[in-house]
Amino acid sequence: MANGTAGAREAALYVLARCRRFDAWSQQTIQTAAEKFSLDERDTALCTKLCLDVLQNAALCDYYIGCYSSVPAAKLEPNLLDILRLGVCQLLFMDKIPVSAAVNEAVEQTKRSGSRAAGLVNAVLRRVAENRENLPEIPNIGTAQELSVRFSHPLWLCERMVSELGYDGAHAFFAANNRAPQLTVSVNTRYGDAPSLVERFSSAGIRAHVSELSSVSVCVEDKGSAAALPGFAAGEFFVQDAAAAMSVLCAAPQKGMRVLDACSAPGGKSLLCASLMENDGEILACDLHEKKLRLVEENAERLGFSIIRTATMDASKPYEALRGSFDLVIADVPCSGMGVIRKKPEIRYKDPKALAGLPAIQKRIADGLAACVRPGGILLYSTCTVFHEENEDVAERFLHDHPDFVREEQRLILPQEYDTDGFFYCRMRRNG
């Protein structure tokens, strides 16, 4: 088994192969690889950086590889292309790795794989290294084709976003998708507010600030895990994106309310509701899969929330006993995830044909949950996507089919606006 940084590179190659061959999620596969290759914390971080850089920049890497390779990138054996992409990412995006290390390790990886293309790998990477300050210009400047290469998103998605946002808006959207997300947490208001949590972190030498979007959200500027931050074990905060927190603030849960979080896992919205309700009321957190609810229960216990209980449920077919029972129903429906590409870069490679059935599923869930809202109560519909057919269009069809509901607030948050996830929410009230 390879050791040190060589082990991190072998682990990264393993992860990329699993993602490519089995559509595996990178974050879970990285954890598996860290155990398989016995990586320490430092090499796990390197493996993670390598994998995310490749997933975020695959098309850009392929363009530069094609500029210097005698064989077009599209005709290279997939494992060899992954090795080259790893090398290019180290040369272009990781200044602390010496050129010699990046090139030599890629050559050794090629040899270990049994490929006879070590000479090609050496030649291509050395040409990239020599031209780092003067790389070939990306063609078709100002078009979707350029954005597809520059930010490594599929052409269909680039064409769509240019059509909807214009070139500049699409450029900002894709650039935001390729930026590393900062850790954002929501404060447990039982312990204080967001400014006091910032002070708590600052006293420990951790840079942080209150989100411009959400008054309960704190953005941590220093890298590291949430569990390592002061106050985590005591339940002073929990991980949640500011855009998701904003949707809950829009719903405005109050003390004594009955709340149904119908697609709850991993539970952030239930937790924020409990915080804003001062642990006074009832919250039923549901999910289709029981194992996903364990995390909700664990976080509720850590944060000291006794009003949250969990249950398995198909949100499109809520239990009859729940009809007309809730002051607030949250429908954070399954979606394409096109607002969280910065956290899950492989989402950009989803087949658009596989996404076509989502609006019908989302509408069924909203329809099913409508009956659970008491007269005068609120239905909050939300997604972490930027596609109108999953957002505004679903809300419009729901309101058309349910004239007893009226829209009170609706918002689409793009990732480039506040350095958050892309997110949509619509607050609808049932007439009393």
Image (cartoon, rainbow, N blue to C red):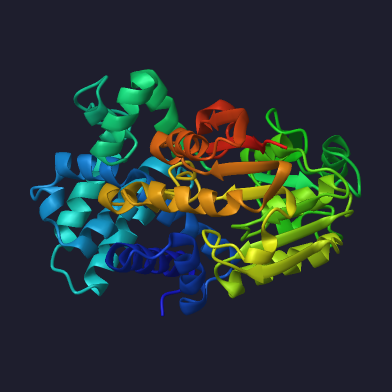
Relative to 87, does residue 6 appear above or below in the rendering? Answer: below
Numbered label tally: 0
Q: Residue 222 lies in what quarter of the image?
A: top right
Q: Position of residue 68 (x, y in %)?
A: 16, 42
Instruction: Name the residue: 63% across, 58% down.
Output: 264
**Quadrant housing residue 145:** top left
The structure residue drawn at horizontal position 53% and vertical position 30%, both measured from the top left corner, is 412
Q: Is residue 132 above or below residue 29?
A: above
Q: Residue at x 77, y 58 (%)?
A: 283
Q: Pick the quarter of the image with the C terminus.
A: top right
Describe residue 380's horizontal placement relative to residue 270 as left or right.
left
Residue closest to the eye, 202 or 314 = 314
Image position, residue 46 (x, y; %): 50, 58
Q: Nearer the viewer, residue 424 or 138?
A: 424
Q: Quadrant of the N terminus?
A: bottom left
Horizontal and vertical percent position of residue 239: 69, 52
